[in-house]
Amino acid sequence: MSSFLLNSPLFYYSCIVLIIIISFKWISTTLSKTNKNLPPSPPRLPIIGNLHQLGLNPHRSLEALSKKHGPLMLMHLGNVPMLVASSPEAAKEILKTHDLKFASRPKLRIPDILLYGSNDITFSPYGEYWRQLKSIAVVHLLNNTRVQSFQQVREKEVALMIDKIKNSDGSLVDLNELFFWLTNNIVCMASLGRKYGGSTFADIMDRFVHLLSGFDVGDYIPWLAWIDRFSGLEEKAHKVAKEFDDFLECVVEEHLDKRRGVDTLYSEDQDLVDTLLDVQRDNATGFTFHRDVIKALILDVFTAGTDTTYASLVWSISELIRHPSIMEKVQQEVTEIAQGRSMILEKDLEKMNYLKAIIKETLRLHTPVPLLVPRESTQDVKVMGYDIPAGTQAIVNAWAIGRDPTLWEDPEEFRPERFFNSSTDYKGLHFEFLPFGGGRRGCPGIQFAIVIIELALANVIYKFDLALPDGVKGKDLDMSEKYGLVVHKKSPLIVVATSRF
């Protein structure tokens, strides 16, 4: 029977037709690609594309490539096209001009595992679900009134941190650790109603952030997804997700117990979980969400609220230690405004122009999330005259833009004065300065983070003179980076703090 089929004319005719169809499809695909005006691309290797060119510090590697190939590049990570914007003009096209077409997120395996199927604000795809979630966050959690309502929490936690430094009595102080617990405690009080400390919680947080920053081969070369399973990456992600889920389940249940009047651990103030439970109960928005959505939102607040904030505090103090003349000027400013009081309060911050310029300069040089969070085009679109197909991932190298010598004079120097008499801010409207992104997927928690940074920084430099141990000069401080979703200082910031009063 098989011999008959192989020798029959019908078989040969079928093969010829199949070859013609395949050839026609290949030719049409090739012609369509040829006819497209694609952005310049670095040469790529088979299978891995340009993955090998990312290096250990992708923001720096991509900056170097952009100098050779231009401010808008099309790279290929495995078989996934990736658009890289490295200029304000290119960033504006993605974040403003074509914001809607680039408003979605790519589907990534690890965030899916860690964040309840990417049901959070940061990683969920663009659509009605995301719009409702963003609206709830902005209206109920991150509006000016809500941020101001936690003023006493912030001031109390900063005062406790200052006491810890004071009690060090000239011994070594690990500012990385102190700033982590400061921001963690504030976020815990604001979102969960009470503090959660201890090495176990810190360990879970550290592993969560590390995994969220990791690279999943299967996202870019699907047939190599087995590598992530073989390496244990997925198993680690599932384990951390389970540990965090168990913790958050207890948190939600404790809040429900409080409402029943059987729990007294929490303050009477309304925290983030209370607010979300109210929204869920009242369903005033017409949007029904389950408990997993509440937990995903809490995780968003933790990762965005803690990691970026304490990293920026560490970078700020590090730069001030390296630049003693700038430290002296800002200490003079905060001392004059404090007028001998024991602590800087939030009401004093609006007068501290030099302090604010220092924070802006820190965010320019040390952009917390240097490549922002990747986006994905949902439609074919033209960007700076180039054809960008639907399904193309897009990243904005905000770090490279912040160090572009055509935009900033002496961009590698720490010079806060460049922000004097300047309207440039970090709210996403100035595309030469994008520490928190921009457009509809920009960070909604800017105000929450900035007030913590300002208050903590003002009080530390007001109360203490800081020096490096063993007589090391500030100019010799190690400023190397540890790359991740958030870029941290690689070595901890250890100082000797001497009271100024």
Image: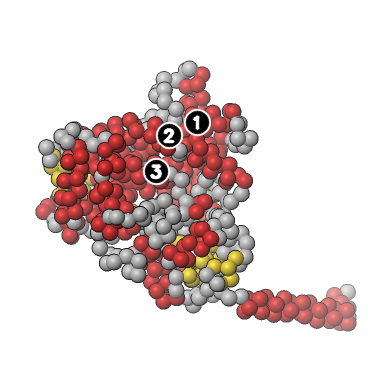
Q: Would residue 156 be seen by someone viewing this image from the given angle?
A: yes
- The label number, if any, that marks residue 145 in the structure image: 2
Sequence-first tag of 3 and 1:
1
Type of amino acid under label 3: Gln
Sequence-first tag of 2 and 1:
2
Distance Cα–Cα, label 2 vs label 1: 13 Å
Secondary structure category for the residue under label 1: helix
Horizontal arrangement in the rendering, residue 482 relative to residue 319 (left or right): right
Horizontal arrangement in the rendering, residue 382 relative to residue 417 (left or right): right
Q: Residues within 10 Å of mark 1 (few under 14, many from 20)?
A: some
- The label number, if any, that marks residue 275 in the structure image: 1
* Residue 108 placement (x, y as % from top left): 54, 55
Colour setup of the view: secondary structure
**Looking at the image, which residue is at 56% across and 72% down?**
386
User: Could you say which is closer to the camera, residue 6 or residue 191?
Assistant: 191
User: Which label sits in the foreground, 3 or 1?
Assistant: 3
Q: Residues within 10 Å of mark 2 (few under 14, many from 20)?
A: few
Horizontal arrangement in the rendering, residue 12 relative to residue 132 (left or right): right
Q: Is residue 469 above or below residue 23?
A: above
Horizontal arrangement in the rendering, residue 433 relative to residue 20 (left or right): left
* Residue 296 placement (x, y as % from top left): 51, 41
Sequence-first tag of 3 and 2:
2
- The label number, if any, that marks residue 265 in the structure image: none
* Residue 180 placement (x, y as % from top left): 32, 43
Distance Cα–Cα, label 3 vs label 2: 11 Å
Using the rendered view, name the quadrant where residue 343 is placed. Answer: top left
Type of amino acid under label 1: Thr
* Residue at far front of view: 421
Type of amino acid under label 2: Thr
Q: Which residue is mark 3?
A: 447
Secondary structure category for the residue under label 3: helix
